Image: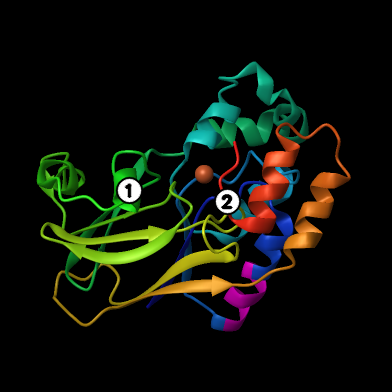
Amino acid sequence: MKIALIADLHGNYPATLAMDRELNRLQPDEIWFLGDAVGKGPQSRDTCDWVRQNCTRFVGGNWDYGIGGKEFPADDYYWSQLGPERMQWLRELPREMEALISGTRFRLFHGRPVTPLMYDSTDWAMLSAPFQAHGETYGGVIFADSHRPFLRTLDAGYILNTGSVGNSLGVPKAHGILIDGELDSETPAPMLMSILSVPYDNEAAADVARNDPELPFREAYITEVTTGIYSR
Ligand SMILES: [Fe+2]
């Protein structure tokens, strides 16, 4: 069973289409979404619709709730692009989910609590906390939000980050992760975990923003898409 996990599309439709082409070639059995379909980029309606049409499991991200719940008045650009039906879908996304793969129980959510993992940390309490939740001890955590993909083990278990499809930092390509294992199986079994890195036309993505003077933080988005350097 091949599962692709993607997140942080952030209104970058050229990057999403590049990822879509690669996923069509790889033919995963399922595509799971870990939050932030919208915001930042100029084509949030298209990336939101892509997620809804192609993914089978969903958790929301901070931008999905912020825009869907009208938390920040400065986001009215996105509200008018998305409309009330998509915004309702965004704000009602579940906060997290779990999945059993090859005998490992994974906890999946968008992020924040383990964002320090982007950096070098040996704080055991901080690193192990995400593995304990809802009276469960998880053997793996999968999250997004940092816009940088990684796969590693901690003393508490596996920790995986999807990276970002549309707003990658560090390496400005469209990223996701792939897991090949036995879905819904309690039995320990081999499992393949890998990072999917897909080049796309970054200048074409920046041009969509250049042609949209209403886009909030437009220059920051263009810099991030073309260089992978966080700019807000
Ligand atoms: Fe994000």
Q: Is residue 209 left or right of residue 198?
A: right
Amino acid type indicated by mark 2? Ile
Query: Which is the main secondary structure of the residues drawn in magenta?
Result: helix
Q: Which residue is mark 1?
A: 97
Position in image of residue 88 (x %, y %): 59, 30
Residue 36 seen from this side = yes
Q: Residue furthest right?
A: 211
Give the quadrant of residue 154.
bottom left
Q: Secondary structure at mark 1?
A: strand
Magenta range is 19-25
- Residue 103's place in the image compared with 37, above or below, is below
Is residue 191 placed above or below 10 in the rendered structure? below
- Color style of the picture: rainbow
As drawn, 91 above or below 151: above
Q: Residues within 10 Å of mark 2 (few under 14, many from 20)?
A: some
Give the quarter of the figure containing the C terminus: top right
Task: List x then y, in percent, for residue 127.
Answer: 18, 48
Q: Is residue 92 left or right of residue 123?
A: right
Q: Secondary structure at mark 2?
A: loop
Left or right of 59 in this view: 218 = right
Compare marks 1 and 2 and give the one earlier in the sequence. Answer: 1
Camera-nearest label, 1 or 2: 2
**Place of residue 101 in the rendered image (x, y in percent of width and height, measured from the top left):** 26, 68
Q: Residue at x 14, y 48 (%)?
A: 128
Give the number of callouts: 2
Q: Is residue 220 magenta?
A: no
Q: Is residue 194 left or right of residue 66?
A: left
Label disc, if present, on residue 229 of the rendered structure: 2
Q: Quadrant of residue 203?
A: bottom right
Q: Quadrant of the N terminus?
A: bottom left
What amino acid type is highlighted by mark number 1?
A: Met
